[in-house]
Image (cartoon, rainbow, N blue to C red):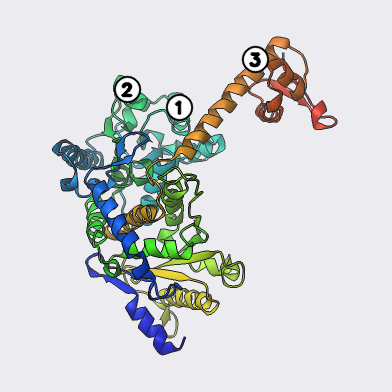
Amino acid sequence: MNPTNHWKRYCHYFCHCQEIGLSLDISKMNHDDDFFARMRPAMEKAHAEMKALENGALANPDERRMAGHYWLRTPSLAPDNSIRRDIEETITRITDFTAKIHRGEITGQTGKPFINLLIIGIGGSALGPQFIADALQLPKDHMKPYFLDNTDPDGFDRVFAQLAPQLEQTLIVVISKSGSTKETRNGMLETMSVYRRAGLEFSRCAIAVTGVSSDLDQLAIEQKWLARFPMWDWVGGRTSITSAVGLLPAALQGIDIAALLEGASACDAITRIVDTQSNPAALMALMWFFAGNGKGERDLVMLPYKDRLLLFSRYLQQLLMESLGKKLDRDGKAVNQGIVVYGNKGSTDQHAYMQQLRDGTDNFFVTFIQVLRSREGHSEDVEIGATSGDFLFGLFRGSRAALSEQGRQSMTITVEKLDAFTIGALIALFERAVGLYASLINVNAYHQPGVEAGKKAAGAVITLQKETLECLTRLNSAMTAGEIAEILGKEGQTEDIFEILRHVAANHQKGVKVDSQGSLEKWKFVMEK
């Protein structure tokens, strides 16, 4: 294609949304000019389904739930006044509570102001808050955020070591809709133990974000925690970032949550436009469909040329892969759908995997993000006539061109600056694109049966561990994994029993010793006396 045609295609497929300071360029995707006409009926259906969703249609028939994350930033859209009032009252309560923390009206046990924030959660209860915290962190922030987002004891210890000198000045937010998520519960219990050993009352620095009447809600009431904020059953974890899940930690940190909500609401309004050429979410959904042949045959590589957006790909992994990764479509047909998402940041990508993207397997498409404003304030030249930001811009354009020369597809999101409003707009943009794309491929984006299956399997391992240790204790002799499996009548789980015993022996606390002489079948395990 000659340069003149490149420019014409760029102008034709450039979507500029001045209201939110965002544009989308899809000219480097390889679709033909008739693609949009062919997809018009499917896109019209997707818009109709999105409108029904926003009007309160059941989005998750498995659990008889609506999906109301769009109401969170525009409460007037809620299907009834009680939901609207709940949203508005929660935002007001978050703002009022945060102001009291920042003014020192609510303090730690020793009377010192809170300066640290420990968020305990996992999945949607951590990825969104982590992304916002990192993207919008400033030196003037009121509080410094820390996260327990797994059930890794060593990970716990690393965070606790950082907080130890100021433990009494650390405010804790425990986030779990059900209140029974094991990873979050474990993090909470370990934190309680740390506070107890330090002579501090956990309840005097704890806040719960959870479902009404959940186990966590009841615990917070019983122990008289500082505050409780709701998670509603019509908000899924991966779309909860503009609920109390994301807003409370952000507000406590010092982020402008009103601007965040405003940006999300403004983007929602733009992405309701039925005209595809003016709707960046519709364009993205169609490009996902085109690139992957409607079957997710290509991976989505996120390359933001901004350090503050490094965690965006991690957040998007859950949003896209949990929403779209489905075995069955809405008609019960096996389709094994999904889009794999991974990413780095520019220009680190050029020193990591740009070589393969350009010359290796062509099984992906890239989404670049560029931020026009390099920094707040003046930039010195690092070479005559060029700043560090100019170099970053040049490296972005170079990467885009290098991929295009090899026929590798990409699209580019451009924002004017990175602030709370823009982050809100980016969140809404991808949430809307996921909803529209799910309709195009006929899957339910609002349930996650595979996640529940994994949780059940994990619970079965813990049960088997208890049975194995009871057997070893009761028989009080050295045995192989195979012998224990035979006694338990679980020969088909011998490998699991072997791995359980190897795990507990390495951690000493259970009192199991291992004699690892010979082949695996001959390894002997015994309970220490």
Q: Position of residue 312 (x, y in %)?
A: 42, 56
**Residue picked out by circle 2:** 218
> Neighbour class for label 2 at 10 Å: few (<14), some, many (≥20)?
some
Quarter holding residue 375? bottom left
**Residue picked out by circle 1:** 189
> Neighbour class for label 3 at 10 Å: few (<14), some, many (≥20)?
few
SS at badge 1: helix
Front one among 410 and 525: 410
The residues tagged by marks 1 and 2 sit, at their Cα atoms, a distance apart of 15 Å
Ranked by sequence position, the earlier of labels 1 and 2 is 1
Front one among 406 and 506: 406
Q: Residue at x 50, y 77 (%)?
A: 404
In this picture, residue 461 sits left or right of residue 330: right
Q: Is residue 216 above or below residue 66?
A: above
Ranked by sequence position, the earlier of labels 3 and 1 is 1
The residues tagged by marks 3 and 1 sit, at their Cα atoms, a distance apart of 24 Å
Would residue 177 be seen by someone viewing this image from the given angle? yes
| Dot 3 amino acid type | Glu
Quarter holding residue 498? top right
Q: Residue at x 28, y 29 (%)?
A: 226
| Dot 2 amino acid type | Gln
| Residues at circles 1 and 2 in contact by the CB criterion of under 8 Å | no
| Residues at circles 3 and 1 in contact by the CB criterion of under 8 Å | no
| Residues at circles 2 and 3 in contact by the CB criterion of under 8 Å | no
Mark in the foreground, 1 or 2: 2
Q: Is residue 60 above or below residue 259?
A: above
